Image (tube, grey):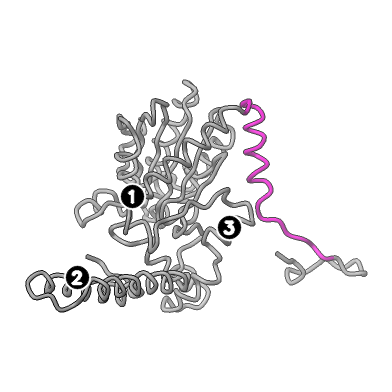
Amino acid sequence: MTILPHEKQIVEMQETIAKLKEQNKNHPVWSQKELLEMEQKLEQLKKTIYSQLKPWDRVGICRHPGRPHALDYLEKITDEYVEIFGDRTFQDDHAIITALARIDGQKFLFIGQEKGKDTESRLYRNFGCPHPEGYRKAMRCMRLAAKFHIPVISLLDTQGAYPGLTAEERGQGWAIANNLWEMARLKTPIIVVVIGEGCSGGALGVGVGDSIGMLQHAYYSVISPEGCASILWKDASKNATAAEVLKMHPEDLLPLGVIDQVIQEPLGGAHLDPASVYSSVKSFILREWNLLKTIPIERLLENRYQKFRKMGKFEVLHSESNEVPSFSSLSK
């Protein structure tokens, strides 16, 4: 069991209460009232600790080995599914899962970035870092969905697209850019959910959508905190500082229009109660689908275009002279 730094005090108290209950079975020492008071103190401790989490603590929650991954959602929220393989050009990329699925009788095309859970599966899934063929596979399936008027569900969870030489040789940048272009005009509703890490173009390559939800402790950023710290400060140990200044969590992104809704997680994170998260994500998908299916396709595409067009606003402050404004005159 992986215990995060902020969870240690909670786990210690849980273990203490469990031992006292076990001892009480044969030699009652603690009254039920005393045990109840301890459990109430435990709940209060949880609320206190989880209400004071720092951005870097939440990155730890987002990366917890027990956190549900894309394949878990595919298995738990769908009635049935059939996986689709290959990009019809090079090979199948195991870091991206594509499948035709049903949720409460409604057909969906499912796309998920999968990291794996143990050493063997993580190597098989390339730690959730897709190759170009993964993006091409996703787009091949999305075109199929549009042809048959099937809505698309895309689950984001990656530290970024694979940056290796082989990926660059096969057109990594082009594959991601092409997906951005094609998804922007794909004639079917697209629902995106950030379930874990949403880093850089690796996430955005399957992240253009009409409705974007984000789990409470997920993060969505142009770069990972470690990468940001290495570039800005040449010091990877400043990852906690980077996590704070990147403003990459739902409460930061919602006012900017980068996401549309925050999906709450159970107290402490999704790894503590996966069933609750499956239910919340399923409800979000069905609720958004019921809304999007009422919008005419041309209006849907225009709304999607405007949604991304409005991101990244800035103002240019001109001085009284005719001088060209410097970069320092730009404000957020």
Percent coordinates x, y for residue 6 in the rendering: 36, 74
Instruction: State which quadrant residue 100 falls in.
Output: top left
Give above or below for 233 relative to 255: below
Q: Give the residue pinned by disc 2.
A: 18
Q: Give the residue pinned by disc 3.
A: 253
Q: Distance between the Cα atoms at labels 3 and 1?
A: 22 Å
Q: Distance between the Cα atoms at labels 2 and 3?
A: 40 Å
Which is in the foreground here, disc 2 or disc 1? Answer: 2
The 10 Å Cα crowd at callout 1, few under 14, some 14 to 19, many 20 or more, is many
Using the image, tell me which numbered label, if any, was put on residue 69.
1
Element under label 2? Answer: helix
The extreme top residue here reads 148
Q: Is residue 303 left or right of residue 163?
A: right
Q: Is residue 62 magenta?
A: no
Percent coordinates x, y for residue 85 in the rendering: 31, 33
The 10 Å Cα crowd at callout 2, few under 14, some 14 to 19, many 20 or more, is few
Q: Distance between the Cα atoms at labels 2 and 1?
A: 30 Å
Q: Earlier in the sequence, mark 2 or mark 3?
A: 2
Percent coordinates x, y for residue 278 in the rendering: 37, 45
Element under label 3? Answer: helix
Toward the viewer: 14 or 323?
A: 14
What amino acid type should be assigned to the residue bearing mark 1? His
